[in-house]
Image (cartoon, rainbow, N blue to C red):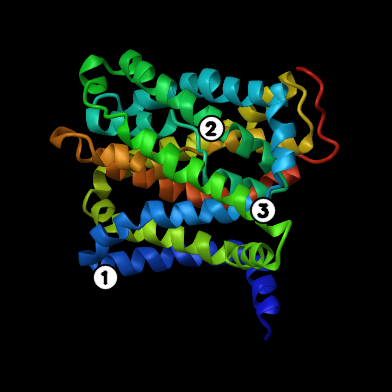
Amino acid sequence: MSMKGIVETMERRQIGLYLLAIVAGGVFGWLVPSTSETLEHWINPVLGLLLYATFLGIPFAAIGRAVRDLRFIGATVTLNFVFVPLIVFGLSRFIAGDQALLVGVLLVLLTPCIDYVIVFSGLAGASSDRLLATAPILMLAQMVALPAYLLIFIGPEVVSAVDPKPFVEALVILIIIPLAMAAMTQKLAARNRVGRAVMATMESLMVPLMMSTLAIVVGSQIVGVGEEVASLWTVVPIYVAFLIVMVPVGLATSRIFRLDTGSTRAAVFSGATRNSLVVLPLALALPEPFTLVALVVVTQTLVELVGMVVYVKVIPRIVTQHTPTTPI
């Protein structure tokens, strides 16, 4: 089989391959626990490379148009910073008696995703260019809003323990640098074959890069999840409920802002996917009483990745070209 045929086959079967990567990463991490720390160091590099490949596939002219789409920006900001906090506060009451679980749930569910949501939403036919345009906005907004939400929901003692440095590092490493490199590569591709070859190579690596990211994240944390499974099991229903609830909430918000089909799918994904990979370094930086927080975040990653596989199949059937977009 030619390389082109292999790439096309992987693209057709990518959902199954992603699930295989999750299982393989979990099995490897469980059988070889000594590699967990090494794998953890690889999370940001492989995620940054995945996003670079993702950004290459979106024309920057489309990003310019998306930035001017105030309706979509208004919908995603309202969804993520008005409706989501209300929903999260209600769901988090079920584990309010355990501070470590509560901090972990709030930390991950209050922060909208700015990375692989672009990939998964694109698989569902969403306007991923609009999500790309809003990524810096959502990142900056959550940096400001998260301490305020934690202050309201928990108290000042937790806020004082949160270091904003991982957020800044994530913005630079996962968004600004890959975005700048993608822009330069596209500009280079318009003039010579080297740039075009780089773009073609990265496009063919999209599925392997996503598989690597999923396997590394799961493999780096699976032992810790297994050791605390009794405690972590209590947050799984919360994460599942969040994924279910955010579908009608995302649809309602999209109708309020009169979004088209592609933008509605993108908004639903934006409201449902959380910033687990980006807040994981933040969780790991918390002091001793909050060591369980990182595992609570990783548990959300595992639940959400399975949820995204379902979303990719279900959302296009719910949000069709005939879905009403008039205000409710």
Which secondary structure, mark 3? helix
Task: Determine which of the numbered discs, if any, sits on residue 186 in the image.
Answer: 3
- First in sequence: mark 3 vs mark 1: 1
Q: Amino acid at mark 2?
A: Pro
Indicate the quadrant containing the N terminus: top left, top right, bottom left or bottom right.
bottom right
Residue 11 on image: x %, y %:
66, 66
Where residue 68 is drawn, which disc sits there?
A: none
Say which mark, if any, is on residue 136.
2
In this rendering, the label closer to the viewer, 3 or 2: 3
- Locate residue 174, reporting x and y percent: 46, 45
Give the residue furthest to the front.
191
Q: Is residue 58 left or right of residue 309?
A: right
Residue on which the image places disc 1: 31
Which badge, 3 or 2, is on the more N-terminal residue?
2
Residue 276, can we see it?
no
Q: Position of residue 13 (x, y in %)?
A: 64, 68
